[in-house]
Structure formats: structure tokens, C-alpha cells
Image: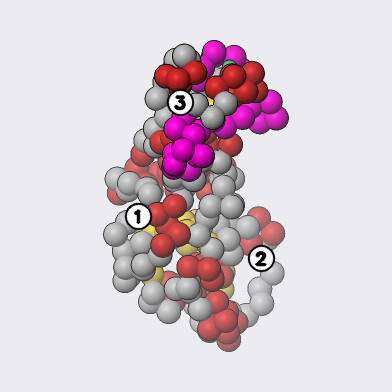
Amino acid sequence: MAEHSVGNEQAGWFDSTHGHNFLHHRLTPHPIPKENLMSRCLVLNASYEYLSISERWIDALSLVLSKKATSIEEYPEVVRSQRDEFRLPAVVVMNRYVKTRRKVRLWIVPTRKLVFSRDGFRCQYCGTGVSMKTGTRDHVQPLSRGGPDVLANVVTACRDCNGRKDDRTPDEAGMKLLSQPRSLTESEKIQCLLKTCRTKERDTWLECLTRIGVRLG
Ligand SMILES: [Zn+2]
């Protein structure tokens, strides 16, 4: 999942240097339990689409304090400055729409993890169970023949079936697909995202996403 999350800096919309200075001037260095430091924040775009995951609470909090984002769900933990105390943001929504090209690719890149879990770790030609180690990805319309490298063109295949199919379409190889490759459903996207979360984050995010009816991706 980490490989797909849109990094704050990479997306070019978050000035981390400014954010940190801004906060460090205000927050006294209260000792914060390690667990709190690991509270990640789900960042939604102004359109309520998934934008990124903020790995550090200080990044998320500075988005809120600099009025770039609004916190719509918070963890119970608080951090204190001399005057104020802030609850750690769990889900924030950007106040202005952020354009990012990377967002579009988030859920279509056919990584082994996404393809195998969508297909229930079964070869989509013979039904044999595969593992992360033994499974392979098969481009239904072969890459060499212009097939796109997206989830909707990639299925799980055991090594035997992948070898047998070779650079052919299933029709040409006389092989039948148990199911057609497809993009992830909205609930699969959420499940996939939640699998990478710690329990505390998962419960908080899921509750919030359900409450506001957010579609991810
Ligand atoms: Zn097979």
C-alpha cells in the first residue's frame, strides 16, 4: 500500500517545511506516547475522494491549523501547546481541490497484491490456489500486443497456466477465464486501504467513511 499512497511532498500540495516550522513554534515539546506519534491521518480531497495518507500527525495537524484542511474525524489523543490543545486528526478534508495526477493511478496499478487478493489467490484459468510466491500475473490481452497494464487486464495465474498461455489471448490459447479481470469495487478499495491500517486507524477511518458515505478513488 505504501508504494501507492500519494506522498504529501510528491503531490506538491503540502509545504512540509512551512508546516513544521509553523507548528514547532507553537507546540511545546510535551512527551507524546509513541503510539500517538504513529497515528496516521487519512487525507481526502475537497471532492471527498481519497488523496493521501499523512504518515505523521504533525503534518495533518499543520494542514488543519494552516486552514488548508478541515478535520472531520479525530483520535482521542491530544497534543498541547502552552495555550491550546489539539486532538490528533484522523480524517481531514482539503479546503481547496488539489489536482494530482498520481491519484488517478492509485487503484489501477495491477500489483501482485491487488490482483491476487481480488482473485482470492486463485489461478483464474485452472482455479489452483497460489501464494504471493507461487502466483504470477497474466495480462489477458498480452502487453506485447498492446494490452494495457491495468487491473482490468490482469488476472492471477499459476506458473503452468501462464506458461501455457504465453503471448496469446485466452481464445487463441484455448483457455477459459474463470472470471474476467476488472477494476476494484468501491468496497474492495476501502478494504484494501484498511488492510494497511493499524486497528485504531481502521476503526476510526471506517466509521468516518461510512458516516459521510465517501467513495474512495
Ligand atoms: Zn492455473
Q: Amino acid at mark 1?
A: Glu
Q: Where does the image place residue 195, in percent across and percent down from the top left?
A: 55, 39
Does residue 73 sit above or below 159 in this rendering? Answer: below
Q: Who comes first in sequence, dot 2 or dot 1? A: 2
Does residue 53 sit above or below 25 in this rendering? Answer: above
Task: Give the residue pinned by disc 2.
Answer: 32
Q: Amino acid at mark 3?
A: Thr
Does residue 22 sit above or below 210 in this rendering? Answer: below
Task: Give the residue pinned by disc 1.
Answer: 49
Q: Over which residues does the magenta segment extend?
A: 124-150
Q: Nearer the viewer, residue 50 or 178?
A: 178
Residue 67 image-quadrant placement: bottom left
Point 31% across, 71% down: residue: 96
Q: Nearer the viewer, residue 49 or 84?
A: 49
Between the residue at mark 1 and the residue at mark 3, the CA separation in whole angstroms equals 35 Å
Q: Amino acid at mark 2?
A: Ile
- Ligand 1 resides in the quarter of the picture at top right
